[in-house]
Image (spheres, helix red, strand yellow):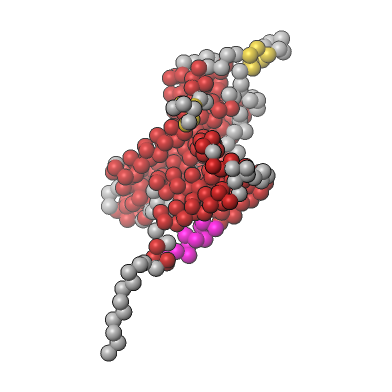
Amino acid sequence: MEKPRKKAFFPSWRAVFQSPTTRALAALAFVILLGVIFNADQAFFKWDTHRDMLRQISVFGILACGMTLVIITAGIDLSVGSILGLTAVLFALFSLQLHWSPFLAVGVTLLAGLVCGVASGGLVAYFRIQPFIATLAMMVFARGMAKWVSGGQKISTAVLQPDGTYVYQEVPAFFNFLNSKILGGNIAVVTLIFFFCIALSWLILAKLRWGRYIYAIGGNEEAARLSGIPVVATKLLTYGLSGLFCAVAGICQAAQELQGDPEAGLTYELTAIAIVVIGGTNLMGGRGGIGLTFIGAITIGYLEKVLSINAVGEASRLMLTGIIIIGAVLFQKFRQ
């Protein structure tokens, strides 16, 4: 008679790496190790490097918050970069040239992002258009709208006069606030906004019934519909929130650059998707979380910082990002 095998006291590596959190943390640890080894005159050991990394990744991280919600529903949002560009132009126009109050400028800009997101959600939910196609159409439309509103020019403090000269306006105090650092210069305001977006997304996914609806739709949309879950309303909410996060990112982008650039946000959707995928959220939907997205954002942030301080060119960074996305997706596929 064959003796029963004893249970191993320690879990196998295979079992350990079945956890998305473990895999995400392992990727982060690997990137940090690269930073320690290739530290470019000890730059990686200075707090300024980490503070600047958080500031630089914050706009991408805000976009990734909305992308996470969409991907969990088994969707995708290719329009996040274009909506960022449109809302950055609108916010700069309202604040720098029309001199609206910050509350009105922020409110209308957020509303514009929300409308764009809901429009994408409507195409997906009501007309059953594939998310890839619907958000691709919104990507093109929002970019065109940004160029139309701005006249193809950057919206800055320089205002063209009828005689062909430029008059430079004063930078609004709200722009300076968004672009400032607090707590003794140790953390940027835009980073705190990123943390707030992470917290809001976590609240939606973990504590509200809408979060359960989002997971259910991503797991099996037909079963969710038969269970009485409002699929259409949930998708509208999800894509609307993605558009809202894009507007928040657009406001931060305009404040950092002191202008609204109609070309802002190009390829940002690539980085947002990379953050979500590297964090471990499943592209097939139904699984993932905002905590994983935060880990993915920090991983991409450190990777960009390590490449930057070691003077790696932008072309190589883009190619590496593409390779990382494919690698992460293939890893997920093999683990299923």
On the rendered structure, is 73 left or right of 330? left
- Judge whether residue 269 is colored magenta: no
Outermost residue toward the bottom?
A: 1
The residue at 31%/73% (across/down) is 7
Q: Main secondary structure of the magenta part?
A: helix
User: Which region of the structure is painted magenta?
Assistant: 327-336
Query: Residue 75: in sight, yes or no?
Result: no
On screen, 150 above or below 196? Answer: above
Q: Quadrant of the C terminus?
A: bottom left
Q: Quadrant of the N terminus?
A: bottom left
Q: Nearer the viewer, residue 315 or 29?
A: 29
Residue 46 x/y as whole percent: 54, 38
The residue at 27%/52% (across/down) is 227
- Judge whether residue 330 is colored magenta: yes
On the rendered structure, is 312 left or right of 286? right
Residue 81 x/y as whole percent: 55, 38
